[in-house]
Image: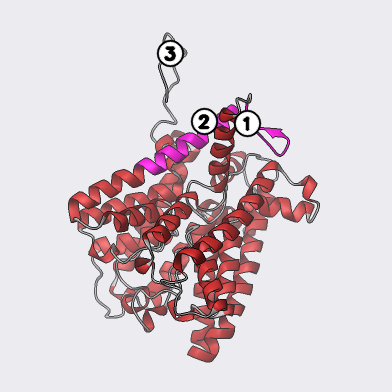
Amino acid sequence: MFAKMRNRLTRTQWIAVGFFIIILCGTSLLMLPVSSRETSWTDPLSALFTATSATCVTGLAVVDTYQHWSLFGQLVILLMIQIGGLGFVTIGVTILLLMGRRIGLADRGLLKDSVNTLELGGIVRLAKLIVKGTLWIEGIGAVLFSLRFVPEFGLLEGIYYGIFHSVSAFCNAGFDLMGRFEAYSSLVRYENDWLINLTAVGLILSGGLGFVVWRDLEKNRFHIRKYTLHTKMVLTALVVLVAVPTGLFWLLERNNVLAGLDGSGQFLGALFAAVTPRTAGFNTTDVGAMTDAGKLLTLILMLIGGNPGSTAGGVKTTTIMVLLCYIISMIQRRDGVNIYGRRLEDGMIEKAAVVFTLTLSMAVTAAFLICALDGLPLTDVLLETFSAVDTVGMTTGITRQTSTGSRIILILLMYCGRIGSLSFALAFTDKKQKSGLRQPMERINIG
């Protein structure tokens, strides 16, 4: 039966089904009385919402992670975050390797699609690098976090807090346990703490860098000329999307949400506000209290997201760069799109346009439906829907105010955002036969 099902499904469909099964398993576990602090059953919708948010490494929550969930429930959430961040295929292949099993061609192809790489060769070595690198980075992050949490919470609880927040930050999930001080407060109490802020920023950027980039950096080290075009584009976007938004957030919010901080605190606040919308979901300032310009900048950064083949969501930095280069090329009337001495395939431009359009359409359509259902402020709803589809987790606080219908919409957005808007669409069309017939051509006016 398993073999027949495997042959009937495409790799894209396998990935979609796999995440769906993980979400259902997580929902079942979170509904159990042992998962809640009050040892009572959690309603199915809240459990489903939390399981989807954790597996899709989003961070939106309808109940506070610390105040509602027991230690068992928190560990279930942590496990789903790790599986969702690395991908269940990567973890499955690692388990098979530990068991001494041979990885077949079909499994290698599935892994290739899961980590979003172009080459099948060396895919098993890449999986090993992903797991080893993740353990090292999350371990270092846990130690650094623990330096602050152990004196505050005690040895065992401090270490647990360090591990939980390190995994959550690296996987760009945004779940936190700071509800022990105030519900849904995220990392606001540490807004002026250099250790917490820089550790979180480092983990977020490391997880959002992309596993293919990891491999290139490990192979070529500091020989920049040997980097692939993909790595060069990613690193360029990294520098620009950290430096420029940091300056913009300082300019926009220095007399608003950053007003009560000293110079270093304002820098930390602006830096964190620039990094976390690239799908991490933590916050050290009140998102709801931001200026409209600050919220719009946050929304733009959420739409861009991280890099392909990483723990981050969004339409991805390379998608935006390809579209921008294409626009410049069209304006300058150039033939094709060139960047760093290389010409991009026309198919890449078409794919970038489709991904951007689908993601934008889903977020706007969902915002329209939620506004119609709940009558919430448009700006807050837009930030919520973009946060869901781009698997960010930032919110102005309206998540708990949404109705059942709106929560179902947000669940679907998070699921689509994790597997990718284009992948979600292809999951329904991959098996359809392509017709060899082409319709007559006719020109229309554009612009």
Above or below, comparing residue 365 to residue 201 in the picture: above
Residue 411 vs residue 222, the one in the foreground: 222
Residue under label 3, please give it: 443
* Mark with earlier residue (3, 2): 2
Q: Which mark is residue 337?
A: 1
Helix, strand or loop for disc 1: loop
Query: Is residue 26 located in the magenta-colored stretch of the structure?
Result: no
Residue at position x 45%, y 20% from top? 434
Q: Position of residue 357 (x, y in %)?
A: 42, 38
* Mark with earlier residue (1, 2): 1
Residue 123 vs residue 241, the one in the foreground: 241
Q: Which residues are magenta?
A: 336-361
User: Quadrant of the rendered structure where residue 392 is?
Assistant: bottom left
Task: Sort mark 3 into few (<14), some (14-19) or many (20+) by Cα contacts within 10 Å.
Answer: few
Q: Amino acid at mark 2?
A: Glu
Helix, strand or loop for disc 2: helix
Q: Do callouts 3 and 2 mark residues in contact (Cβ within 8 Å)? A: no
Instruction: Give the spatial CA distance, label 3 vs label 2.
Output: 19 Å
